[in-house]
Image: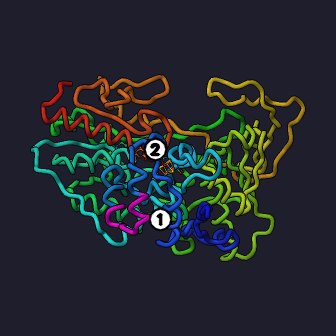
Amino acid sequence: MKIPRQDMPVQEPEDRVRNFDEVALGFTLDLARKEAERCLQCKEPHCMEGCPVEVTIPEFIEAVRVGDMAKAVEIMKSKNNLPAICGRVCPQEVQCEQRCILGKKGEPVAIGRIERFVGDFELANKTFEVSKGPATGKKVAVVGSGPAGLTCAVDLGRMGHDVTIYESLHTPGGVLVYGIPEFRLPKERVIRAEIETAAKALGIRILTDHVIGRTLTIDELMSEHDAIFLGTGAGLPMFMRIPGINFSGVMSANEFLTRVNLMKGYLFPEFDTPVKVGKRVAVIGAGNVAMDSARCALRLQSLRASENGAQKGAEVHIVYRRSPAEVPARLEEVHHAKEEGVIFDFLTNPIEILGDDKGLVRSMRCIRMELGEPDESGRRSPIPIKGSEFEMEVDQVVFALGTNPNPLVFLNADGLQRTRHGTAVANQETGRTTMKGVWAGGDLVTGAATVISAMGAGKRAAADIDRYLKGEIDW
Ligand code: FAD
Ligand code: SF4
């Protein structure tokens, strides 16, 4: 009998909008094994082609099917050191699962859900020990502790190099910690556990509060290390150039999410972090960052309402200039946001933010859009419909329109070239930059992308750094 794709248990929408606990609860062993049974064990599996770190997908699924979890972990960890994270946040529907043969006529194997189960099993049971290779005596500085930096550092540690991570914030993890909310990616149980295990087992030093470009320059780092990897991400937010963006109540998604996540605004009332949450919030954009902002705003509205009395009429809108077909966020996040009550205003674009006499946001003027011919991104371009302007009553506007790399890391690093978009110039295969001994990868090179693509870049750079330091290849 054909086995249907197994659903993952989740918190009910009406419960979860009142807390920041994880929404998706994960497979049980039975569910994971049942889902694993669906895999056809293709002789030429296409799923692997969709994975940027080349996890041997059919092999780990087979180990789960027969219940050999230690083996599943070992197979997974040989390619991916952060499966509990990737299983939660990777856009599998456009990666491995999109290539799964079962998806041609029905639903693909739920590779991400099984991966998450394997990652969580390992965190709970510690069946796998990462070990440091024989010491090479070479020192490497890794700048930035997001997925690119962490992956590069762990691989280099396993290869026997002496690694120090320099991180500008007070907590390591990059976007995994300051951007993606607790209800999608639990910080203590998943991220801290992964980082601590790697740091302890491999002797990686993590120096927080070190802003490279300011605290130390690349030249200064170079004088003490044999190689440098830059994984400083793309944390500089973009705004629209429309009147009114200086009113109080307008902010970037980065600022909003950092206050909620890193500065513990989500632990209200235990932590009374100053974080503005309006009664009627508009989030501009429809990527993962926009979904996270909208869903955080909903939760904070309910938490504050239960503390201060009901907030009648509280609403959160996603305002997006294209149609549902172009939404860039993961399908699951959009589905969850809708279930929780986020209102979607498609084909709508803000043209002005209006304030009151105290300088606070009071509303937003918008215009309706229609879709024209595809633009250079391949998506149909939005065109304003003349005379369709209208006013939307809002008291907070959060911009989630994408980010660029922060230029700080380039300070006093003359040999390090940037593209006109502000990203680092680097070889896609090796990560080598235009400065001898310096590699780069992740969002710093690609612009805002995904966790797994950043990890893939960290891996490729670590392999190249290793060969270079061992004298197997020249610069
Ligand atoms: P980052 O994660 O940005 O890490 C860079 C690190 O470098 C940071 O810790 C930063 O503090 C540090 N740094 C910066 N400058 C310096 C300096 N000068 N000196 C020292 N340290 C410095 N991707 C997905 O695949 N799935 C998702 O569901 C998803 N959701 C997202 C939700 C949000 C809210 C955001 C913002 C992004 C999301 N992404 C998602 C994208 C993904 O998180 C990024 O592509 C990924 O984190 C990039 O990794 P990175 O290591 O290149 O950079
Ligand atoms: Fe299994 Fe799908 Fe990969 Fe084939 S393509 S091995 S069915 S996960």
Q: Position of residue 120 (x, y in %)?
A: 42, 66
Label annotation for residue 45? 2
Q: Position of residue 303 (x, y in %)?
A: 64, 71
On whether ligand 2 comes within 8 Å of the CB at mark 2, the answer is yes
Measuring from the top left, give residue 336's x and y in whole percent. 66, 59
* Badge 2: residue crowd in 10 Å (few <14, some 14–19, many ≥20): some
Q: Is residue 63 magenta?
A: yes
Which portion, as a residue range, is magenta? Answer: 61-72
* Residue 322 belongs to magenta span: no
Q: Position of residue 226 (x, y in %)?
A: 16, 36
Q: Amino acid at mark 1?
A: Pro
Mark seen at residue 399:
none
Q: Which residue position holds label 1?
A: 186
Q: Nearer the viewer, residue 212 or 330?
A: 330
Three-letter code for the amino acid on which mark 2 is drawn: Pro
Image label count: 2
> Which residue is more in the foreground, 90 or 66?
66
> Where is 317 relative to 36, above or below?
above
Whether pointer 1 and pointer 2 mark residues with C-beta atoms closer than 8 Å, the reply is no
Name the secondary structure under disc 2.
Answer: loop
Q: CA distance from mark 1 to mark 2?
A: 32 Å
Quarter of the picture containing the N terminus is bottom right
The residue that appears at 57% across and 54% down in the rendered structure is 256
Mark 1 or mark 2, earlier in chain: 2
Question: The C terminus lies in which quarter of the figure?
Answer: top left
